[in-house]
Image: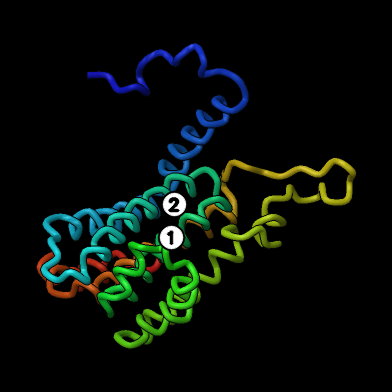
């Protein structure tokens, strides 16, 4: 049965916006076709995510919210890769989301009261802001794995520097060389073959791996049934 991609486009699928979306799709296919190692690595990380969410049934009340956050982190990883294949700078906000879902899961798993507080966020906004800080998340991770906590912090700060916030690295990295002082400033949106593209995709892989390692601290027995220790080593090889 044909997919929507094979069907004629709707009449409303016209104009710059939808043409740009088509360009993003075309760009993504070209990037994967030209970079089989990167594509294979992203797929390997995605497979691990998909495997560990299967059959994950929390036996403790404090793990119910972390399970939901694992599903959201998985979704954010896929979204970061999807966007990163065409719009590198925009991927970093999604990378931060992937990390933060994992970090919140680790923090919440330490105390059932935090789970209840998280669910009732609108009723306890001041307390939420007090309890759910990046420092608290990092400390929760560090209690079990100092190295993962260090990597988490580095990736978290990188995501902010390169696109999750409107900082100079993301903005200036998109400027077309030689146009800044010409009176005809130009920026690139599509990734193409560029330093920004490869930096974004490499970072996506690192974020996915780090997030999975954090969830392994929350669900160690379940992850062990999927041979996580060996699979994450294979997915973490340099490229």
Q: Residue at x 82, y 47 (%)?
A: 179
Is 37 placed above or below 227 here? above
Is 46 placed above or below 232 here? above
Is 163 placed above or below 7 here? below
Q: Quadrant of the N terminus?
A: top left
Q: Tell me which label, 1 or 2, sits earlier in the chain.
A: 2
Q: Position of residue 234 (x, y in %)?
A: 26, 67
Q: Residue at x 46, y 34 (%)?
A: 25
Is 116 placed above or below 25 here? below
Instruction: Identify the residue position indicated by label 1 in the image.
Output: 122
Report which quarter residue 150 is drawn in. bottom left
Horizontally, residue 219 falls left or right of residue 5, namely left
Between 226 and 123, the residue placed more toward the observer is 123
Horizontally, residue 201 falls left or right of residue 236, namely right
Instruction: Identify the residue position indicated by label 2 in the image.
Output: 80
- Disc 1 to disc 2, how far (Cα)? 28 Å
């Amino acid at each position: 049965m044909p997919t929507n991609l094979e069907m004629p486009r709707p009449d409303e699928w016209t104009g710059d916006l939808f043409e740009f979306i088509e360009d993003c799709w075309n760009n993504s296919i070209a990037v994967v076709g030209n970079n089989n190692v990167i594509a294979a690595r992203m797929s390997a990380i995605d497979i691990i995510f998909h495997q560990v969410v299967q059959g994950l049934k929390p036996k403790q009340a404090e793990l119910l919210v972390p399970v939901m956050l694992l599903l959201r982190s998985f979704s954010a990883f896929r979204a970061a890769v999807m966007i990163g294949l065409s719009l590198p700078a925009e991927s970093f906000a999604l990378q931060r989301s992937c990390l933060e879902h994992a970090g919140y899961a680790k923090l919440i798993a330490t105390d059932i009261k935090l789970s209840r507080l998280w669910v009732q966020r609108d009723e306890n906004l001041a307390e939420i802001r007090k309890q759910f800080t990046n420092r608290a998340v990092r400390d929760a991770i560090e209690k079990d794995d100092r190295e993962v906590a260090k990597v988490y912090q580095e990736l978290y700060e990188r995501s902010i520097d390169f696109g999750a916030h409107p900082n100079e690295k993301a903005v200036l990295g998109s400027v077309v060389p030689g146009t800044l002082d010409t009176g005809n400033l130009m920026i690139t949106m599509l990734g193409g073959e560029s330093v920004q593209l490869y930096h974004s995709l490499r970072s996506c892989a690192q974020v996915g791996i780090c997030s999975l390692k954090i969830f392994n601290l929350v669900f160690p027995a379940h992850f062990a049934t999927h041979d996580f220790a060996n699979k994450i080593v294979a997915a973490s090889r340099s490229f």
